[in-house]
Amino acid sequence: MSVPRRSPGRRAARRAAPLTGTPAAKTPPNQTRLGSRPLVAGAAPPTNAPAAPAPAGGSPNDAVLPPAPSAGPNESAAAAAAPSPFASAESAAIPFAGAVSVPHPLELAGLLHELSAQLLGASSVAEALDRLVCFATGAIPGVARCSVTLITDGEPLTRAVSGTAGQGLDDRQYAVGQGPGLDAARTRALVTAQDLAADARWPELADCARAEGVQSVAAIPLDAQRSSVGSLSLFVARPNGIEPELLLTAMALVSQAEVLLAELCRREALSDGATVDRAVGVIIAQRGCGVREAYDVLHETALHLGMDRRSVAERLLSAAAARNATPPRNPTRP
């Protein structure tokens, strides 16, 4: 028995039958539709939106979209007072108003390159700090003095200085325990004072600032060593002397110096280890003891003399080298 076949006319009629209703418009894959408005910013209006009538004398192709409703006076004032979403906290923290002048990128790149060459050529961190303050004093216009303050074991100490003005100001803030340099080192934040003699944060420094002829100060946090925190202070002899270009240049120099000082600290650590190891070898040869006992002897000697292990190791190596360089005496012949 054969299976009855459907008539081809019925299939054609089914394909040709009109659809009921209006098909939904397809949504582009990069849009999410809510009603008839796309949620993509800047997207074109939907095609089924009513078009505005064409202007008089023009063709239908000249039709334009209806203008957006104008904002009222209250809305305009609120929009003008609203903060920009692109404003950063760093730009808001810079204590300046109006347009900010920045150093030229080529000049700043040249300064960073020269600073890198000078600091990497230093033989120690102390020498690098001396080079840093001298470079900052000469490279930043208007700076009368530059100093680096490090706080180690709770005691502040000026490790490097360039310029004569302001030494009494550093000593005074160490005596009272507060000031721009100390606050920047402790809080790890930028500290500026456009008129130090009238600044209410440090009234103890007012008389000293007048006597030293220092009006403006900028203190920038500086990480020089792992065991200490510090800051770099710039002293200017005129009020309102901490200008945007000065501050931005100084911050760039300090950021570059931190990277270079970290590399110098790493080199010093490797050198210290090599010097101590050589001194331990001398102790082993002299006493015939083991490695651990030799390290203990070096450590106890450093504590007894109040010196660090590297200094004791260098003295021991110098004494051993001098003893080996002395020629043996010839025995006296009868």
Image (spheres, helix red, strand yellow):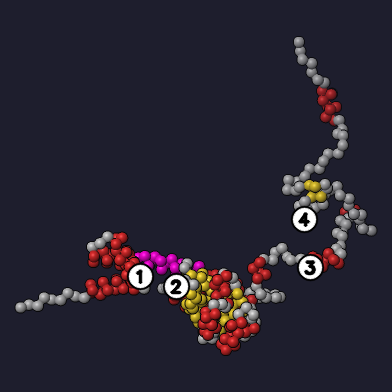
Would residue 107 be visible to someone looking at this image? no
Earlier in the chain: of badge 4 and badge 1, it is 4
Mark drawn on residue 303: 1
For marks 1 and 2, give the CA distance: 23 Å
| Picture quadrant where residue 19 is located | top right
Task: Tell me which residue sits at (83%, 29%) in the image.
Answer: 15
Question: Which quadrant would the N terminus be assigned to in this image?
Answer: top right
Mark drawn on residue 290: none
Residue 137: x and y in percent read 53, 81
Would residue 179 be visible to someone looking at this image? yes
Q: Amino acid at mark 4?
A: Gly
Task: State if disc 3 and disc 4 touch (CB < 8 Å).
Answer: no
Q: For mark 4, what is the residue?
A: 42
Q: Amino acid at mark 2?
A: Val
Task: Tell me which residue sits at (86%, 39%) in the image.
Answer: 22
Mark drawn on residue 125: 2
Mark drawn on residue 80: 3
Q: Amino acid at mark 1?
A: Leu
Q: Residues within 10 Å of mark 2 (few under 14, many from 20)?
A: many
For marks 4 and 2, give the CA distance: 56 Å
Secondary structure under tag 4 reads loop
Numbered disc in front, either 4 or 2: 2
For marks 4 and 1, give the CA distance: 72 Å
